[in-house]
Image: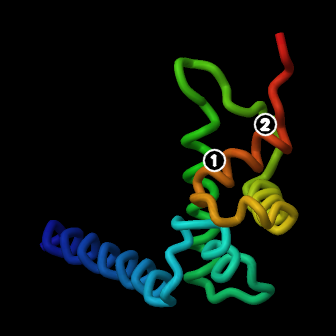
Amino acid sequence: MTRHYLIALMLLGSLVAFAQTADIRGSGDDVTASGNAFLRVCGKASMTDNEFGYCHGYVYGVTEMFAVGTLGKHVFCEPNKVTRGQEYDIVVKFIRDNPKLAHAATANLIQWAMIDAFPCPKK
């Protein structure tokens, strides 16, 4: 009986996660497409819980992906005590401060924002 309960719980969790993503995507703005789309959903003063979670989660995921960099070289050198909220604020500010770049893919903008905020020392 507990096995069936766990399977049902996993299915329910998957449905909830899908519904939350669909709610964000249903807004007509794909936050991954460009900085403009990202700001329309994620740059608002007031977001729904779903928007907040999706936007912050997206920035966190992309930041983690770029943190290691390629071929073992760091793309940016973020101090250990930087919070996820700070990372998010840095990205939103970077896009707002650089409207000429806002058409670029959001993942690129996140990377550029973090490089701008936390450049690695030159060797």
Q: Residue at x 76, y 59 (%)?
A: 91
Q: Which residue is mark 1?
A: 63
* Residue nearer the viewer, 9 or 115: 115
> Total of numbered circles in the picture?
2
Mark 2 residue type: Glu
Q: Is residue 7 left or right of residue 54?
A: left
| Percent x, y of residue 75 | 68, 31
Quarter location, residue 34: bottom right
Q: Residue at x 57, y 50 (%)?
A: 62
Graded by Cα atoms within 10 Å as few (under 14), some (14 to 19) or many (20 or more), the crowding at tag 1 reads: many
Task: Specify the color scheme.
Answer: rainbow
CB within 8 Å, label 1 to label 2: yes
Placement of 4 over or under 71, stated as above or below: below
Q: Residue at x 81, y 26 (%)?
A: 120
Q: Secondary structure at mark 1?
A: helix
Q: Is residue 16 left or right of residue 4?
A: right
Graded by Cα atoms within 10 Å as few (under 14), some (14 to 19) or many (20 or more), the crowding at tag 2 reads: some
| Percent x, y of residue 24 | 50, 83
Q: Is residue 84 left or right of residue 9?
A: right
- Which badge, 1 or 2, comes first in the chain's sequence? 1
Work out which quarter of the rendered image holds the C terminus and state it.
top right
| Percent x, y of residue 6 | 23, 69
Q: Is residue 88 left or right of residue 9?
A: right
Mark 1 residue type: Thr
| Percent x, y of residue 25 | 45, 81
Q: Which residue is mark 2?
A: 78
Q: CA distance from mark 1 to mark 2?
A: 10 Å
Placement of 79 over or under 31, stated as above or below: above
Work out which quarter of the rendered image holds the N terminus and state it.
bottom left
Q: Secondary structure at mark 2?
A: loop
